[in-house]
Amino acid sequence: MGNKKKILDRLGIGRILTRISHEIVERNKGVEKVVLVGIRTGGMYLAQRLQKMIKDIEGTEIPLGVVDITLYRDDLSRKAVPRLRETTMPFSLDDKRVILVDDVFYTGRSTRAAMDALMDFGRPECIQLAVLVDRGHQELPIRPDYVGMNVSTSYQESVEVMLEEKGDEDQVVVI
Amino acid sequence: MLIRKAALKFRLYGGKVIDPHNQLEGNFDILVENGKIARVTPTGSTPKAPPESGVENIDVSGKIVVPGLIDMHVHLREPGFEYKETIQTGSRAAAAGGFSSICCMPNTNPVNDSSSVTEYILNKAETGGWVNVFPIGAISKGLRGESLAEIGELKEAGVVAISDDGNPVMNSNLMRRALEYAKVFDLPVIPHCEDKDLSGEGLINEGFISTITGLPGIPAAAEAVMVARDIALAELTGWRLHIAHVSTAGAVRFIREAKARGVAVTAEATPHHFSLTEEAVKDYDTNTKVNPPLRSGKDLDAVKEGLNDGTIDVIASDHAPQSSVEKELEFESAENGIIGLETELSLSLKLVADGILSLSDVIAKLTINPARILRLPKGTLSEGADADISVIDLEQSWLVDPSKFNSKSRNTPFNHWELKGRAVMTIVGGKIVMRDGVIQE
Amino acid sequence: MIWQRKHILGMRDLEAEEINLILETAESFKEISTRTIKKVPTMRGKTVVNLFFEPSTRTRTSFEIAAKRLSADTINFTVSASSVSKGETLIDTARNIEAMNPDIIVTRHSAGGAPYLLSKYVNSSIINAGDGAHEHPSQALLDMLTVKEQKGKLKGLKLAIIGDISHSRVARSNIFGFTKMGVEVRVAGPATLIPVDIEKMGVGVFYRIEQAIEEADIIMMLRIQMERQKGQLFPTLREYSRFYSLDLKRLKLAKEDVTIMHPGPINRGIEISPEVADGPYSVILNQVTNGVAVRMALLYLLAGGGDLD
């Protein structure tokens, strides 16, 4: 342990987000019904960045929500209680094309929890998943639609996405 | 008494004798013959008895040998509440705790307010008891505080004092008459001092703990007021008053002052009142529920001071067995009471370790002092006296484990306490009833 | 911090950082009550038993809604005095309920300390929903959440609690809670209704309402109960009202933006004059909403903390 391997730097993250922004616009043929929902906390900052980039491309600011999945997890009482944070969804999800944003895709359980949460806010037309890193080990039949980078990791390793918004320098490391 | 296998003739040798009655303190051998103390001789002055003499030599060197301990305030619950304790189990607990004599309070069912109940108790003690049992009769019929019990007949039947313990005699005139009448029969009167109007629905001491627990409080003044009244009545009647379970600084002060003026008043304190404060009650442990309640730190200090300066003459346990049915309840519904016979000596010895009392003072408060108050021919190692003897190992440390108690009940707040000093032998009328913690069946 | 406590027996036991965590968690839960679907699956499969030995529609309903919004199964037992008089003890009742394997038992009892007793005999987590004159922690927490929302903070505020402090579990819990959070707490009432040594709880003691509410940020008026005191604690309601009721004139002594709280139900015209009760200072409805959020937080923390390995 203790071995840190940097897999993405600031420029790399920037390039990936730019590409995903374009992919989102292209795949949805514009952004008319598109909304972004970030999963706390890493996904929230990435969603904010995507919102800004898409505005630069399309000229419109698409709505942004934040979901805290704590209450939808399937492992409550299996470990210490996670600290609960606020969910903000200042719009209805009915008939929206929701882009769910997370930093790392791992087992798929967080995505499952986030989708359950989204369903409580309406009936979206579709949900697509955007992630910065797909590290493998998927445990549920869920795959991301937009992947920044595929990295193969072992269970012992962890992937950390460090962002300026969290007070770090932009980079992704495998520990 | 039960038939017990015991040497008829034996010699305790090598022990350190402390007999406050005879002001004896030193290494002596004690020869017991026919249930009496035959001879007390300096250790080494007489040779060991040869085997053919039939005298068993019992080595008690390193131990303390004292007159058989007396607890003048216990509840044996028989007749009427045999599920809590019986004369047999209660006296067995006494033997285990080093006590050779106990006095049992009259709040049984029926109440010991008539000679037939007294005779019943004495008969039970004679046939099934492990130690000497001296009944205390009621002051008033049914402990109701309305009219006098048949005190003369009680005396003839064998009671050694009268008390309405558990119930204060609220009627001052009845208390006055009780003192006057008891004088005729030479019986001390033992009041439970509590002004019921002041204590009201109180459950614990009134103070910080009652405030934070929201449990109704009993002010210290509820005791002091009645102690003052009873002292005034003792003066009025010129008769002997022994105040049970003193728990407050106010009561200690009134008794001290009365003694200084020559009033015939004596007093006792319980181990729980000099070992625990109201702090123990804050998590609602019903084993700390007792009347009078556990008091403040200041009261505890005053009780210790009273023990120290002789204001409080006696240590008594107020051994009050309660079954789990009465204790595993909401605090307000649980019964009062703490059992004490099996922890009393060790907790009293702690007073020596804490510098409150000398060892000899502790022994006096557990032997000759109660004997004098009750006019019992006990509490002494004089030659010719009944061979009631306790042997104590001051060095033995032990962990309180209520499941090992001989008492039928388990209601002690001292569970898991590590105590030092313990009786290792109890001798009653020349018979060894407890040896090394084991009751001699 | 990591939540490790198994029971909520009283504010007395809670540390300031635990109180903070409960309040923050409750703040997050408030959002759920504004959704169209006011329910999250967090406590699916868990069972919450409301074991009430004293009738209380408001508190019980609040706990029930809280549990339901977290998807827990709830069972209500209101045990009447009659079944207790049949000889079934509290422990018997609790053991019967325990056989159903509840995760949390929410209990109210007229005897102070009853939840302590339960916690010793059952494996479930216990939440005290009011015991005798002892504590009512969820009420204090919702009061604290309400004040925090109103004033934006707790530390440094002045709180005056007026009335029958002796018999009030709400007062006790609030004194423990608010003092731990750095609020200056004062109590006032006739000396017969102020328990001894209460200053050792870190509060200022006054016998006149005027002194206690001076410059107060929050005034909490306790319900006065005539029936329990038989004329020995104060002479008449009329005299009590004259010296201790909160009217417009007295209210001027407090801060201009003072908040008035009452654990309810109010004796209008006795502890609070009608003008004050209906005035703009009252936050009684916020207290109800916050009650559900605080109780969700307590259930959530206890449900998760139970199996810590």
Image (tube, rainbow, N blue to C red):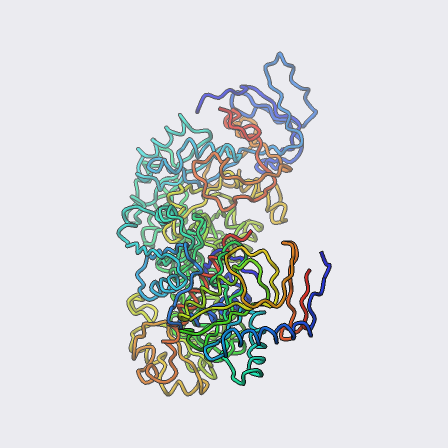
Say which of C61 and C207 sits in front: C61
Q: Is residue C65 left or right of residue B411?
A: left
**B293 w.r.t. C259: above or below:** above
**C274 w.r.t. B350: above or below:** below
Say which of A83 and B287 sits in front: A83
Residue pictured at 51% horizontal, 66% vertical: A84
Q: In which quarter of the image is the N terminus of chain A?
A: bottom right
Q: In this view, does C166 lie to the left or right of C274?
A: right
Residue at far right of view:
A3
**Image quadrant of residue A91?**
bottom left
- Report the label total: 0
The image position of residue C270, as x and y in percent, is 31, 77
The image position of residue A103, as x and y in percent, is 59, 67
Q: In which quarter of the image is the C terminus of chain A?
A: bottom right
Residue pictured at 64% horizontal, 32% vertical: B63
The image position of residue B108, as x and y in percent, is 34, 39
**A87 w.r.t. B435: above or below:** below
Residue at far top of view:
B52
Does the rendering let one see residue B254?
A: no
Does the rendering let one see residue A160?
A: yes
Q: Is residue A123 left or right of residue B382?
A: left
Q: Is residue B417 left or right of residue B142?
A: right
The image position of residue C30, as x and y in percent, is 43, 71
Say which of C38 and C124 sits in front: C38
